[in-house]
Each structure stands twice: as C-alpha cells, then as structure tokens.
Image (cartoon, rainbow, N blue to C red):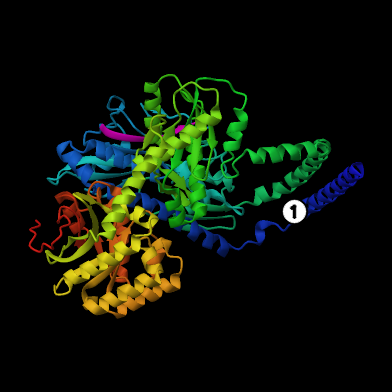
Amino acid sequence: MEKINYKYTFLTLFFLMVFTLLALLIFSFKISNENDINTLSSNSIKEKMFIKEKEFLSKIDSYISTLEAISHNSFLKEYISKSEKKEALEQLLVTIQRTLPEAIQIRVLDMEGMEKIRVNRVSLGRLKEKNFSQIVPSNELQDKSNRDYFHKFKDLEAYEVGFSKIDLEIEQEKIVIPKQTSLRLGTVVNDNQGRKSAILIININMTEFFEEFEKNVLYDVMLIDKKGKFILHSNKKYGILSNTFDTFLFKDAFANENTSLALRYDEYSSDTFYSKKLKQLTNGQDLRLVLGLKYHELASSKEKDRDLTYLIFILLVLLLLPLIIYFSKAPDNLKNKLKTQMITDNLTNLSNKEGLLYEYQNNKSLDKIVIVVQIDNFLKVANAYGYKVANQLLKSITKFLEEYQYRNRFLELYKLDRDSFAFIYSFENRSLLKKDLERLYKDVENEEYVIRNNFKILVECTVSSSSIEPSTNISRKLEEAEIALETAHYKRSDIYIYNKNDRRAELNKDNIRLATKVKKAIENDDVLVYFQPIYNNKTKKIEKYETLARLKYEDEIIYPNSFLSISKDIKKYKKVTKAIVKKSFEYFEHLDSEFSINLSAEDISSKEMINYIYKMITEYKVGDKLVIEIVESEAIENYDEFLKFIKDVKSLGCKIAIDDFGSGYSNYQYIINLNEYIDYLKIDGTLIRDIHTNRKTQLLVGTLKFLCDNLGIKTIAEYIENEEIFEYVKSMGINYSQGYYIGKPHEEIIDNIEVS
C-alpha cells in the first residue's frame, strides 16, 4: 500500500510539473507579445517627474534640517567657543549619523580647513552588511583647506546652507576605493560671541541616496550636469562611478534628440524624455533630473524572456530527479523534522532546553558550566506594545547573543523559557567568569535592539551562573543556574553565581519573616500615612499632596516596595487600602488642600473596595479636593466597569490622575481613549531622573507633554531630585513637580517650602 501511495504521488508531481511548465511557456509568450511602451503619454511622464522631484528634494530638505539642528546645538556651541563638551558632541554626531541612512561622514572643520571632529560610517562583516559609526582619532584628522567645497562653505553667511559638487569621495588626496559619490552639505557656525568659528559638513553617499528614486519599470531615472554628463543613472553602466562617465553623454543616450535644448531650459519635454532643473541644488553643476522611456530595454526584453523560458524549462526538468529522490526519503525526513521541532525553539530557531539536555547527555567535560540570561522587561514590552513586537525583540536579542557564541569562553547558545537564554561556558577561573558575566550583562543592557520601522528598545536583564564546582552533569548545572537566577531576582542582583550555601529556602524564610511583620502591623492598625508635597511650577506654590503608605512594626518602618506584594499574598491588601483611605480622608476633611490616593487595578476591580471609597467620599465630603491616582492601568480586565468607576468618582467631584506613566506598563492609546476624564498625568521617575542630560528622554517627555497639552491634561513630573532636573522640567512647561528636591514625605503636610 505504501508503494502505491508513492507511485501516485510521483505521478501527481510529474503532471503538476508538466502543467507548470506549460503555464510558464504560455506566460512567456504572452509577455513577448505585450504592447510597446510608446502608448504611454507625455502627461504620465510629467506626473512621474513631479513625484520624483518632490521625493528627491524632500529628502535633501531632511538633511538640511538635520544640518541646521546640529549647528544650533549647545554641545557644538560649547565646543567651538570653549573647546568643551567634545565627547558629548561626538556622541551626538554618532547618534545622528546612525539615523541618516546615506550619511557617510559628519565633520566639524575650523575656519582654516582643519578637521576637528569627524564621524565616519564604517561597513563591517564578511559582506560589508553591517554599518557602524566611528569617531576618527585626532591623529587621523586631515587638512581640507585645499578642497573647493571648503572655500565655498567658508564664504557662506552664518547658518546659511551650501552644497558641494556631486563628485567622487576623496580621502588623503586619493579617490576612495571602491568609488563613492558624495554630495556635501555645509554651513558656517558662529561661536557664543557671534564670530564664524567652525564649518559643519554632512557627506551624503549619492549612489545610495539615488537608489530610492531610480527603480522604475517604465523609465530610466538620471541626474545630469550642465555638460550633459550622467552624474547618476539607474543603469549602473553609466554615471560618475562608471568607466563611461566622460565618453557616454546625455546626447549619446538619446541620439542628440533635443538634448541641447534640454540643457538650455529649466524644464523640457520630448517624445523620449522629460528633464527638469533642480534649482534648489545650487552647487555649480546646474543639475537636472531626467526621466527617459525604456524603449530599447523593453524591445530587447522580448528575446530575453524567450531565452528565460527555455532556461526555466531546462532547470525544472533537472529539478525532477532530486525531487523524486527527496520524496523517497520523506518518512525519514519527517521523522528528523519532528525530532528537530521538539528540540528547537520555533521563534528563534535556537535549540531549546530539551535540545541542550539532549546534546550534553553523554558529554563528560568537567570544565563546562551554564550561564542564563533572562530578559526581565519582556512582559512589560509585551503588555505595552503587544506580543508581535515582543517576539521581534526576542529575535533581535537572539541575533545579538549569537555574536557571543564561540567568542572567548562562550560556547553554544540555547533558548530556554519564553524570556531567557542559556550559554554553555568553558570555565577557567572565577575571576575570568566574573569579568565575562559583567561584560555580558553590560553588553545586553546597553545594546539598542532594533524592531520594525527602526524602532529601538533597551532591555533589562539578569545574568546567573551555575556553580564553578567540577561536574559532568549539565542537567544539574542548568538547575543550579536557574536557582541562581531566582536568587538574583530575590536579592535584586544583576549578576549571581550559584552558591550551595545560599539556598532558596533561606530566601523563603526571609519572606515568611517579612510576612509576619506585615500581618501584625496591619492587624494592629499600624498603617501610617505620609504626605509628599506637589509644587505648581507656574504659581510657585505647594498646591497638592500625594498620600503614601508606610507600615510600622515595633521600631521598624516598612516601605511599600517591601510590603505591597506580601500584603496581597497574605490577603491583607484591602485592609491597607481601606486604612489609607480612611486616615487620609480624616486628615484632609477640614483642610483646604488637594490630595491624592493611589488605587491599583485590584482596588478598582473590587466592588467591596469601590463601594467603600464611595461611602468615605460622601461621609467626609472630600470629593472636590480628592485626586485618585490610578496605577497598573494595563492590568484592568473589565474596561466597562473601570470606565463606570471613573465616571462615578468624577460625578462626586474627584479628579483622575494616571500614575507612573512611562514605567513600562503605560499605553498612549489608554490616555487618548480616556482623555476627557483624566485631569493629571504623572510622568514616571525613570524618564525624569536624567532628563536634563538624556536627549532620548527629552524627546519622549516632550512628545508626551505635547499630547497632554492638546488633550487638556496637566502633567506632573516625579523624581525631582535636584535643582538641575527641576529647572529643566520647568523649562519644558510641565505643570507640577514632585520629588525630594521639592519635599520628602512627612506625617504632616508642609506648605511653606522654599523652592528656588
């Protein structure tokens, strides 16, 4: 029966192949008889020209905007005025160069033509497929005073943008090999005294730049100069990089058909081409964008299509033999495939935990240990952006970790659970192991993982290692590494090596002891309320307070980060919330100050809790001064009930704030959907603590503030820890500030704080 099935399978495949070949032949002859391109009208060419010109100049404008932005940057000003902030300026130029796909250089020259800073794009990898940014050492910087573009840019007015000729890239007075075309955008930058002090230049690889515009089925896309030379051409046989640059001209391509008129007028149309002068590129070359009909290519393509058909026929016939051989081995292939699937992670194609144990089941190496890398914020990314993005992140992380394989002492890489990886590591000594673990941790956390649309994500990770004791049992080593990972999370350590004397049982004992303290403090009503002031950046007054919880056990004060999760585990969390609500309402009942309480998704999902809150608001009449701060908004399961709660408390006069926005669980869509009910948005401290120095967080917070301003939501910046952060937050126009610089939490409100 099995042979009969194979026979029918082979016959079916044969006939399918015959019909496929027949279809390909019919398709090939149909292509050869298609109408010629001369049916296209000149209007179509003109419309296409308009699109190409707009795209071309729009992209040039983006580089101009970037150049202007850099020229006004404070780091550049500090450098050319005081020779300070050089490293910051270099890192800024590296960041900008990475965002400009065709920029091969960004340079700062002094007014004598000497390079002061140069950032190069460097291609690495066996196929030069990876691009990196390189800050050129000072001893390799060059004198450009003899270059034409330097003299042109030197004579510009301050912040006026100029263009060089499109020519071949030259370094050390020699043409760069392989050849590259360059267009240089330059501007003169004044120092703080208004003197011309530097020239800022961006080099664009015009071949790469032009690739985006040159692809077109119906037209050749060209860029020519005033002499009719092809600077760039969609056909690689022509253009400045080719050997025909000086010999094959515009007139040769179109048999002198009106080409002289096209070079004379700003815009010209003939039966075979359409040209338009690019007036914005005033670089002395009198550049024109040209579209030409592909008559000769389409005519010759008929014969090529016929040849291609015969080639395909031959290739398909030759493919029949290996196909028959392949299907004869189908049962074995299927068996191997199922086995591979069992030991392979489907997402990353790495061997999984079963694969690790299978591959090392008979390995007797005593010097092998296991290192585990866990991505701690994987769930946060998944909750914020969805699992598709989270899975793309895992693929990007996999690609990064694969570069560690067989480098130094790292051996095979495996995918363990949903968010963790494992390395087999060749152990030499403890000192080297610690250095390698630290380097691995830093590299993983500092890498910017690129997701779709060039979106970049930083991850948080924990690295653990099995013990360094000799053992032939990799299964036991893996178990030790996973126990070490659990211990690291409990101890909040970034890196942890398994220690047989530091058992997980001891950690559980600590949890039990802490649970006892929390339980007694709650049962004895030793729940304390503290109040942290919130400062109005405009009125320069303390206008509101956030209510914070503390527990007191004997002489010890226990903070929320220690007792909240424990209180939920021992089912005492509701008692804590009720105590905070009652005590804060009593405190503010007769005070004329706005105050806030924090409610979690668990609070809002509990009918008992929300009924208690309604009752307390009515009893103490604090609705008009109460702000409810909602945390863990992404954990809301019943959106309708959640929305009803918000509407109900708003009807009682309360205000709504979204807490810790930007901490990893936040969602912009959530803010947009509820904007009519939200009064305040509190920007998490992770975005504020370095906002005065971190350009990325500045952009993110600026975007967030722009959104809130347009939605009528007031912003509160948390974690204001010093004067620099405070001044920067005020300069951004954020409405309120909160943090230790404003005031620490106290058991009594303080309204006479002096804030400079």
Query: On the rendered structure, is 168 left or right of 720?
Result: right
* The N terminus lies in quadrant: top right
Q: Is residue 124 magenta?
A: yes
Q: Which secondary structure, mark 1?
A: helix
Q: Is residue 131 or residue 510 the one in the foreground?
A: 510
Asked if 422 appears above or below 388 in the picture, the reply is: above
Type of the residue with mark 1:
Ile
Residue 684 in view: yes
Residue drawn at (37%, 40%) of the image: 507
Between 53 and 511, the residue placed more toward the observer is: 511
Q: Classify residue 180 by image quadrant.
A: top left
Q: Is residue 411 above or below residue 549?
A: above
- The relative height of residue 592 versus residue 398 in the rendered view (above or below) is below
Measured as percent of width and height from the top left, residue 344 is found at 61, 39
Mark 1 packing: few (<14 Cα in 10 Å), some, or many (20+)? some
Q: Position of residue 261 (x, y in %)?
A: 49, 54
Q: Quadrant of the C terminus?
A: bottom left
Q: Kindly identify the residue that appears in the image at 70 percent across and 41 percent down.
A: 338
**Highlighted range, magenta:** 115-125
Quadrant of the rendered image containing residue 40: bottom right
Q: Check disc 1 and report the residue beneath it.
A: 31
Is 452 one of the magenta-colored residues? no
